[in-house]
């Protein structure tokens, strides 16, 4: 029986992106192991809980590397799939230290957290990627900027381009006008006004504080700003909204279980991110008929190139201008079909070599 290990920083990553691929492998009789922070209770999967810390140089991450190396050595996996930056570097370092040369390392880059700009940050992250590139049999990327970086620095022996992991349209069914109207009323929408939405973890990378700053500069009075998500900067952003005098116009929902209703009730998704891979929140918003206003970073640009609403990262004045001119959404599905799960699943199974297990 073939064995595969999938590694991510958080177990939610598997739930959000990998369940269809895990089920494909299980149906083929492959023994699937996962490893990440938190619990992943998918039937038939063997899960190992890790202790990643977000700071890449944390001693805890060194311990995770050796824990993973021991796991790879014990289980003798045929393939190790790593995801995102931290887990990607740690997982491939672990495979290197394990001494199990037969374990093929395949890395899925959900967005490099650096640009090819020569900055200190970029040099550090690029150096980490170079450390593990010889152990990277396959590298998959999801936006134009990252495939240029991957090819320029030969960060994998084979580099492939994916149209994301696939948006599952079944999770976003159409809703009645009555359901949408009721949700808009709960969120405090004004007739003919605009509900701006930001979905994601509160972090420096997602940069919600820039959205709050821009929103506070608006002259229009017919809009509200809705946040869905949690994270270490949540309380700081709440305090910022109060300090800027927009506490009555901002809604912090925390974790939201029914994002379909939220997307379909709001008018315009805003992303102020510093880095992205191929952002699911933007794809979900487009699929559900929202307009978008996004920073001009990789991933965002790939999805927004035909929709406008792009502003230079950090340009608060331009972000304010775009919000000032935003109109109620037309609610027409505008996500290109190539990003839907039904269209990418089969090709990704081949690109990621799941079909060879």
Image: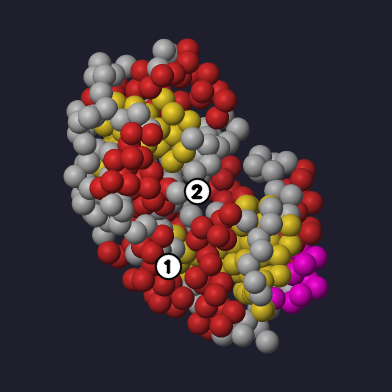
Q: Quadrant of residue 152?
A: bottom left
Badge 2 crowding class, 10 Å Cα cut-off, few under 14, some 14 to 19, many 20 or more, is few
Q: CA distance from mark 1 to mark 2?
A: 33 Å
Q: Quadrant of residue 1?
A: bottom right
Q: Residue at x 40, y 37 (%)?
A: 198
**What secondary structure prevails in the magenta region?**
helix
Q: Which mark is residue 257?
A: 2
Secondary structure under the numbered disc 2 in the rendered image: loop
Q: Quadrant of the C terminus?
A: bottom right
Q: Residue at x 41, y 25 (%)?
A: 250
Q: Is residue 350 above or below residue 135?
A: below
Q: Earlier in the sequence, mark 1 or mark 2?
A: 1
Q: Is residue 343 left or right of residue 116?
A: left
Q: Is residue 245 above or below residue 65?
A: above
Secondary structure under the numbered disc 1 in the rendered image: strand
Q: Position of residue 284 (x, y in %)?
A: 36, 52
Q: Which mark is residue 221?
A: none
Badge 1 crowding class, 10 Å Cα cut-off, few under 14, some 14 to 19, many 20 or more, is some
Q: Residue at x 41, y 12 (%)?
A: 245
Q: Is residue 313 left or right of residue 27?
A: left
Q: Check if residue 355 falls in the magenta segment.
A: no
Q: Is residue 284 above or below residue 324?
A: below
Residue 300 visible in this rendered orientation of the protein? no
Q: Position of residue 64 (x, y in %)?
A: 75, 54
Of residue 174 and residue 179, the one placed in the foreground of this image is 179
Q: Which residues are magenta?
A: 69-77
Of residue 91 and residue 19, the one placed in the foreground of this image is 19
Q: Residue at x 52, y 78 (%)?
A: 24
For disc 1, the marked residue is 160
């Amino acid at each position: 029986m073939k064995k595969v290990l999938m590694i991510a920083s958080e177990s939610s990553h598997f739930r959000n992106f990998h369940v269809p691929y895990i089920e494909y492998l299980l149906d083929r009789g492959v023994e699937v192991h996962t490893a990440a922070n938190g619990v992943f209770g998918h039937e038939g999967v063997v899960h190992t809980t890790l202790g990643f810390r977000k700071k890449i140089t944390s001693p805890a991450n060194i311990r995770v590397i050796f824990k993973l190396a021991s796991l790879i050595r014990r289980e003798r996996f045929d393939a190790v799939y790593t995801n995102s930056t931290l887990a990607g570097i740690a997982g491939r370092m672990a495979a290197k230290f394990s001494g199990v040369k037969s374990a093929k390392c395949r890395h899925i880059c959900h967005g490099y957290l650096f640009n090819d700009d020569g900055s200190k940050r970029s040099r550090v992250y690029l150096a980490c990627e170079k450390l593990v590139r010889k152990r990277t049999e396959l590298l998959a990327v999801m936006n134009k900027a990252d495939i240029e970086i991957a090819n320029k620095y030969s960060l994998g022996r084979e580099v492939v381009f994916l149209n994301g992991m696939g948006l599952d349209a079944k999770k976003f069914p159409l809703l009645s006008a009555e359901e949408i109207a009721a949700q808009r009323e709960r969120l405090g929408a004004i007739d003919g006004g605009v509900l701006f939405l930001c979905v994601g973890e509160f972090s420096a990378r997602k940069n919600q504080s820039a959205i709050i700053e821009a929103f506070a500069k608006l002259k229009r009075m017919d809009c509200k700003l809705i946040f869905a998500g949690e994270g270490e900067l949540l309380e700081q952003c709440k305090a910022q909204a109060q300090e800027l005098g927009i506490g009555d116009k901002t809604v912090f929902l925390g974790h939201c279980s029914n994002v379909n209703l939220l997307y379909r009730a709001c008018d315009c998704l805003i992303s102020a991110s510093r880095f992205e891979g191929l952002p699911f929140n933007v794809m979900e918003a487009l699929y559900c008929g929202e307009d978008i206003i996004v920073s001009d970073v990789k991933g965002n640009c790939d999805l927004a190139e035909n929709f406008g609403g792009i502003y230079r990262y950090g340009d608060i004045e331009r972000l304010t201008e775009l919000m000032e001119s935003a109109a109620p959404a037309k609610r027409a599905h505008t996500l290109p079909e190539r990003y839907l799960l039904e269209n990418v699943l089969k090709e990704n199974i081949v690109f990621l070599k799941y079909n060879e297990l």
